C-alpha cells in the first residue's frame, strides 16, 4: 500500500492510500483534471476507486507528548 498527501482547490490537506504506484496515480490525476473544473480530494479518491478498489482517504491525527 502506498500513502499520498494531497491538497485540493480549497487548500484542504488530506492523505489517501492506494495500491497503485505513484506514476499510475499521477496518470489518473491528469485524466481527472481534464474532466473536472474543481479538484476536490474526496471526489478524486472516489474517481480513483474506479481503478483501485483499495484507494481511500485516511484520517491522520497528531499525537503530542
Image (cartoon, rainbow, N blue to C red):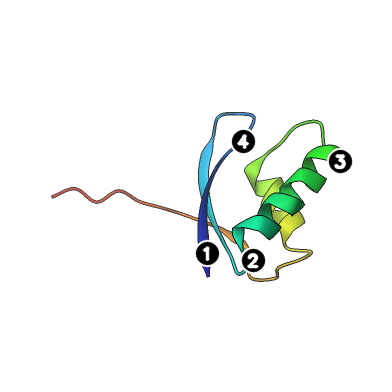
Circle 3 is placed at which residue position? 35
Counting residues from the start of the chain, the first of labels 1 and 2 encountered is: 1
How far apart are the two marked residues, 2 and 3, measured between alpha carbons? Answer: 21 Å
Q: Label 3: few (<14), some or many (≥20) within 10 Å?
A: few
Circle 2 is placed at which residue position? 20
Q: Is residue 38 above or below residue 16?
A: above
Circle 1 is placed at which residue position? 2
How far apart are the two marked residues, 1 and 3, measured between alpha carbons? Answer: 25 Å
Q: Residue at x 81, y 47 (%)?
A: 31
Circle 4 is placed at which residue position? 8
Q: Residue at x 24, y 51 (%)?
A: 63
How far apart are the two marked residues, 4 and 1, measured between alpha carbons? Answer: 19 Å
State left or right for residue 57 relative to residue 36: left
State left or right for residue 47 relative to residue 63: right
Residue 54: x and y in percent read: 63, 70
Residue placed furthest toward the right: 35
CB under 8 Å between discs 1 and 2: yes
Amino acid at each position: 500500500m502506498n500513502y499520498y498527501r494531497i491538497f485540493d482547490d480549497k487548500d484542504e490537506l488530506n492523505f489517501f492510500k492506494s495500491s497503485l504506484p505513484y506514476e499510475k496515480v499521477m496518470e489518473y490525476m491528469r485524466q481527472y483534471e481534464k474532466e473536472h473544473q474543481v479538484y476536490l480530494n474526496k471526489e478524486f479518491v472516489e474517481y480513483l476507486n474506479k481503478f483501485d478498489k483499495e484507494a481511500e482517504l485516511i484520517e491522520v491525527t497528531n499525537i503530542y507528548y
